[in-house]
Image: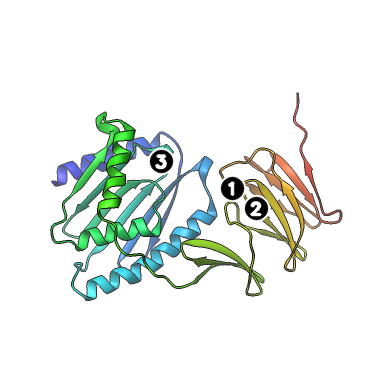
Amino acid sequence: MNKTFLILFFWIFSLTIKATECIEKTFKEEHLNIYLCQNYSNYNETRTLLFKARTKILNDYISEKIKSGQLQNKKIEIQLYDPILTYNHLYISQGKNGYYVNYSGFATIQQLKIFIDYFTDQNWKPLFTSNYQKVSSETISKQIDKFFLDNKTSEITSKQLSVWTLDNLRLYYINDTLKYFVNSVKLDILVTSSLPIKIKNRFLLFQADSIIVLQGQEIIKSFKVDNPITEDYDIYSYEKWVNICNGGKDNWVYSYSYDKNKFHKRKTEK
């Protein structure tokens, strides 16, 4: 695909992204860069950690492909956009200095591996599919699903990685998910929202629909969230309480009292 079209493509998507706020993260390794754009109202630090781990795992995989001669020794650049921020699309190309992928979605590690393996095929072809060209989103989704199905490869094996630590509480990357561990003991708690915080000898762990209080390895309180949000909370910890906010320090929605081991909900005006 020619250089002029490549420039036009990225210009189109840059205009789309500027329409709303994008929180950008870029993970750089020797052979791979992954650029991740999350909408501000859908941002999760845990998702960021997940892609940081995926980048490390895939960089090692790419290194093996380069050593075996299946890939040229040039950078693979993958750009991933929150689907609510841009047109439904998948674009794959190659230039003199790199391999390029631009995709609307939070690709799994297996999907990312498919992108990489696609470039190892000597008969691979550039791909551009987008409903920017007034093709229905449903049609584009089917085309993208077909791409992943037609180019499906073996499952990638990965080592366990520690991605975050707060005293004796850790997050590990295992089988393309994040898991909590306390003193090397795995917790049966989903990692779906804000990173934990600590108040004295307790941790508050956040899920999409609940907040869990952990003391040692024991859950001593579980609080059901009335109105789950997709983005991370703004969390402020003090000596004896924690304010859990949505939209800044003054907009607290829940508060946790250490002394009473109790959550309080902010009363809304009628």
Q: Which residue is mark 2?
A: 206
Instruction: Give me the residue at 18% from left, 72% from top.
Output: 69
Whether residue 55 is situated above or below residue 244 in the rendered picture: below
As drawn, the residue found furthest toward the top would be 270
Mark 3 or 2 closer to N-term? Answer: 3
Amino acid bearing label 1: Asp
- Residue 256 lies left or right of residue 145; in this view the side is right
Q: Which residue is mark 3?
A: 83
Q: Which of the two residues, 124 or 27, is positioned nearer the viewer here?
A: 124
Quadrant in the rendering for residue 214: bottom right
Quadrant in the rendering for residue 265: top right
- Residue 199 lies left or right of residue 58; in this view the side is right
Mark 2 packing: few (<14 Cα in 10 Å), some, or many (20+)? many
Disc 3 versus disc 1: nearer the observer: 3
Quadrant occupied by the C terminus: top right
Give SS at disc 1: loop
Give SS at disc 3: helix
CB-based contact (under 8 Å), mark 3 and mark 2: no
Q: Which residue is mark 1?
A: 232
